[in-house]
Image (spheres, rainbow, N blue to C red):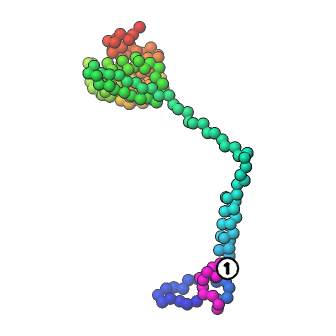
Amino acid sequence: MQELKGRKPTSSIQFGDASNEAAGSPANIIKTPYFLALFLLTLILGSVALYKPLSASTVYETIPAPETRPQTIVSGKTALGRTWVYLVPFEVKNREIIEKLIGCESQGVNVSRPDSNGVISWGILQYNGTSTWGEFSRMSGILGTPVNPPDAIRLTDWAIDHGFLSRWSCARILKLLK
């Protein structure tokens, strides 16, 4: 084996007649057990991957489309004609009442501001303070925040179903109470 100046000699396994063939020549590499094992493995795996009997009896399974979740569009117009829209990923049972409440309470704007009693009212349905939200949330098990419109719509839908519509002053103003 010939050494190069400045390089440490590396050990290599050589097979065959070293006098007839240079180390690392293609003929020498082919004779190594590593190469032969790799070559055989490639042949075996390649033939297994390519082998698939073709027949007319092949069955293809139809995969159904994923279930679509119900969605509800809650929308309205302000007195000035501005349109507001909220798309929520669930069914809203009391959509028309909630649309009227949102139009009256916040004109569709997600706002937090002091109410007539000096307490901050939150979100599109103007939950007054945090006590009303907290009370309804505990009773219903619905979590979230009144400043997230889908959360506010979901909790208000529950509240209306459970007889709490009178908690919104706009329900009285709009004559929504029975």
How busy is the neighbourhood of tag 1: few (under 14 within 10 Å), some, or many (20 plus)? Answer: few
Viewer can see residue 21: yes
Q: How many marks?
A: 1
Task: Give SS at disc 1.
Answer: loop
Looking at the image, residue 166 sits to the left or right of residue 79; the answer is right
Q: Residue at x 56, y 83 (%)?
A: 10
Looking at the image, residue 157 sits to the left or right of residue 173; the answer is right
Q: Position of residue 43 (x, y in %)?
A: 68, 66
- In the rendered view, tell whether residue 92 sits above or below residue 2: above
Looking at the image, residue 7 sits to the left or right of residue 170; the answer is right
Residue 37 falls in image quadrant: bottom right
As drawn, the residue found furthest toward the front would be: 56
Q: Residue at x 71, y 52 (%)?
A: 54
Looking at the image, residue 22 sits to the left or right of residue 171; the answer is right
- Of residues 156 and 40, the one nearer the viewer is 40
Q: Residue at x 49, y 85 (%)?
A: 7
Residue 157 falls in image quadrant: top left
Q: Residue at x 67, y 83 (%)?
A: 15
Give yes or no for residue 131 being in the magenta stretch. no
- Of residues 160 and 62, the one nearer the viewer is 62
Give yes or no for residue 20 being in the magenta stretch. yes
Q: Which residues are magenta?
A: 19-30
- Of residues 131 and 53, the one nearer the viewer is 53
Q: Position of residue 86 (x, y in %)?
A: 39, 28
- Of residues 75 and 153, the one nearer the viewer is 75
Q: Which residue is mark 1?
A: 31
Quarter of the figure that contains the N terminus: bottom right
